[in-house]
Amino acid sequence: MLKTSLGEISVTPIADESLGVRSMCTFVETPNVDALIDPGVSLGSRVFTLPHPLEYKALKENRDRIEKYADQATVITISHYHFDHITPTFTDYTWNWSNLEAAKRIFHGKLVLAKSARSKINPSQRRRGWLFKKTTREFLKEIHKADGITFDFEKTQLKFSEPVFHGEEDTFLGWVVMLTISYNGKKVMHASDVQGPMSDKTLNKILIENPDLLLIGGPPSYLTGFKINEKAIQKGIKNLSVLAKRIPSIIIMHHLLRDEKWKELSKPVFNTAKKVGHKVVTAAEFMGKPNKFLEFKRETLYKTKPPDDSFIKWTKLPRLKQKKTSPPL
């Protein structure tokens, strides 16, 4: 387990690729506030097949963990409206293990601080943000726009950045807001889906905050040559190395960990951190657990641990019926 000098701030990663799913969900506690960050979890599409049963088992386990920590939370924050960062209210067992009741268990009676669904947002996330507000307003306590705003909870400060790019500058994926939680001179920063960051503007914003612990999504190297060019991936690795030199402790999360070669690609980051006595770990390693990468092992899992007949039967259901039916585990 990574030891960090954060005083009375406690950080618990809840869900992440190193825990078998797509997510950056994190729970941060101070004497004044218990914050659940980005309470979403999902599985990713790959060209060869649907997720393996072990992935669905991890999805359910991580969904249950999110609901458990939501029960303790006094505030929930949302960086953007992708479903691996926010629990939708519709039923979808194929990718999100979500339904209205799960959303109610997470958001009922909660104060929610969320990325604006009106400004600096792409069309798909605008629709998702609108739908989230419409379908949760009856059971939320309050929801407030977070973009560029600082919220004080006695001696604890939740500071949201202005929207930054979801990866490359001017990307079609839109924008996210980063969150810095401060208490008694210590800072934890959650930089969701900045992908390295690939943007120098985002890099500078993180450096200015100068957190003691940074949770950050790495670049999506598994998409190299498909949706992202090699130059952009290398820019993300380069900027992550800059952060490793300046920030004492980093938890590397999300997109990068979907690549089987993530550790090799990250050598410059680990080497830079080692030279200055800093630490870079995964969320699982931070908690003293073994990494549980599943997505990039999917094809192998189907060969070495073939699903039983009941699961295969579920995969052949019509798409809409499949989404409304939980897979047999």
Image (cartoon, rainbow, N blue to C red):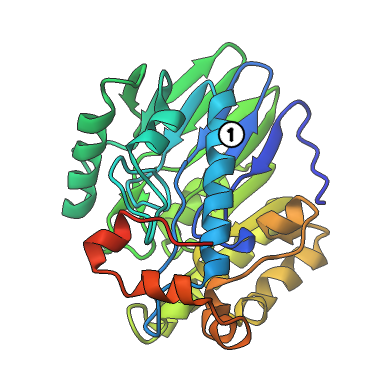
Residue identifier under label 1 = 68
User: Residue 210, relative to residue 266: is it above or below?
Assistant: above
The x and y percentages for residue 261 are 61, 82
Quadrant location of residue 285? bottom right
- How dense is the environment of label 1, judged by Cα within 10 Å: few (below 14), some, or many (20 and up)? some
Residue at position x 44%, y 61% from top? 327
Identity of the residue drawn at 54% across and 66% down:
55
Residue at the (49%, 66%) spot, across then down:
255
Residue closest to the far front: 309
Q: Is residue 177 left or right of residue 55?
A: left
The residue positioned farthest toward the top in the image shown: 154
Q: Amino acid at mark 1?
A: Lys
Element type at mark 1? helix
Image position, residue 266 (x, y; %): 64, 74
Query: Which residue is nearer to you in this view: 277 or 38?
Result: 38
Question: Where does residue 221 sit, x and y in percent of width and height?
Answer: 48, 77
- Total labels drawn: 1
> Can the viewer see residue 259 in this picture?
no
Judge whether residue 132 can be spotted in this image.
yes
Q: Where is 291 relative to 208, above or below?
A: below
Judge from the rendering whether residue 197 lies leftward or rightward of residue 297; answer left or right. left
The quarter of the picture where the C terminus appears is bottom right
60 sits to left or right of 167: right
The vertical placement of 225 against 245, above or below, is below
Spot occupied by residue 250 in the image (x, y as percentages of width and height): 67, 54
Nearer to us in this view, 233 or 113? 113
Frontmost residue, 59 versus 173: 59
